Image (cartoon, rainbow, N blue to C red):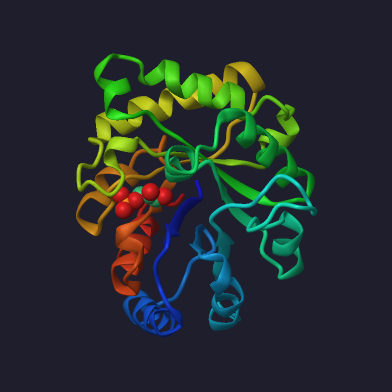
């Protein structure tokens, strides 16, 4: 099975940092990338072209962290999916918990973004995950089911097959509190069964939340976990390369 090691740089990394990242990444990775581990980094909009240039002729893909669902018009400050297409960016994160929480993106808006992304042949990574309150009150599966059902409601099974899901429990993001392998596997199994039962699809499910080289092995070794969407540990090329090397042990 293929594995995915995706990095979400969030609102970090300047041009000089990207050059240094690349050097450290390829030094640590020694033998280069294997086609069975897919690597993509999601960079700020202004640096998409810069990153594409820096990583040209490598197997590192570049993606955007968000996009709007309209193609053009009076939407000051937004980025059209056509702007991304125009510069050759086809990977995009949709519904990151920071977009949901800080920028008030709701299920309705995210369903439109996913629809547009699929219509324009993007490879979207759709993020879902429960808050600490929701987990502690026993609502994890209810929340995941709602986010999936609502987010995917404008898509048919063939379209859903083109999506990658990232399970990112909000309480694990940027907190250093990683989900235990049991917690992550249980949530992934729930998502896998839900997608299978309702849409008859089997798509990659990544885990995200405080992944580091020290804890990644125990997560990515599980067949239910197709890889990671990594925040903090993706900001250093060498630590990110270590994650790729770990994933390489579990491809089949
Ligand atoms: P951290 O790895 O920093 O917890 O962030 C996870 C994340 O939000 C990836 O999208």
Q: Quadrant of residue 181?
A: top left
Q: Position of residue 8 (x, y in %)?
A: 43, 58
Q: Position of residue 223 (x, y in %)?
A: 40, 38
Q: How many numbered dots are placed on residues in this image?
A: 0
Q: Is residue 127 left or right of residue 56?
A: left
Q: Is residue 151 above or below residue 219?
A: above
Q: Position of residue 24 (x, y in %)?
A: 34, 80
Q: Residue at x 32, y 21 (%)?
A: 134
- Foreground residue, 45 or 210? 45
Q: Is residue 160 above or below residue 248?
A: above
Q: Position of residue 190 (x, y in %)?
A: 43, 22
Q: Quadrant of residue 116?
A: top right
Q: Residue at x 43, y 15 (%)?
A: 142
Q: Is residue 80 above or below residue 31?
A: above
Q: Is residue 77 left or right of residue 247?
A: right
Q: Is residue 211 left or right of residue 143?
A: left
Q: Quadrant of residue 22?
A: bottom left
Q: Residue at x 73, y 28 (%)?
A: 154
Q: Residue at x 71, y 44 (%)?
A: 69
- Foreground residue, 186 or 109? 109
Q: Is residue 176 above or below residue 106?
A: below
- Foreground residue, 96 or 25? 96
């Amino acid at each position: 099975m293929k594995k995915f090691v995706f990095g979400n740089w969030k609102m970090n990394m300047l041009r000089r940092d990207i050059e240094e990242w690349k050097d450290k990444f390829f030094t640590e990775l020694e033998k280069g990338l294997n086609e069975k581990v897919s690597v993509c980094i999601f960079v700020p909009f202004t640096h998409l072209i810069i990153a594409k240039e820096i990583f040209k002729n490598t197997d590192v893909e570049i993606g955007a962290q968000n996009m709007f669902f309209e193609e053009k018009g009076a939407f000051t400050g937004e980025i059209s999916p056509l702007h991304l297409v125009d510069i050759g960016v086809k990977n995009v994160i949709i519904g990151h918990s920071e977009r949901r929480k800080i920028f008030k993106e709701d299920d309705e808006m995210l369903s439109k973004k996913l629809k547009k992304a699929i219509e324009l042949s993007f490879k979207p990574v759709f993020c879902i995950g429960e808050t600490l309150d929701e987990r502690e009150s026993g609502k994890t599966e209810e929340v995941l089911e709602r986010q999936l059902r609502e987010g995917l409601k404008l898509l048919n099974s063939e379209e859903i097959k083109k999506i990658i899901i990232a399970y990112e429990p909000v309480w694990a993001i940027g907190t250093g509190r990683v989900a235990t392998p049991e917690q992550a596997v249980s949530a992934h199994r729930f998502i896998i069964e839900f997608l299978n039962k309702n849409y008859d699809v089997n798509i990659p499910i990544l885990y995200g939340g405080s992944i580091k080289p020290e804890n990644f092995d125990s997560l990515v070794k599980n067949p239910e976990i197709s890889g990671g969407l990594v925040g903090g540990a993706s900001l250093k090329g060498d630590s990110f390369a270590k994650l790729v090397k770990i994933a390489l042990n579990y491809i089949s």
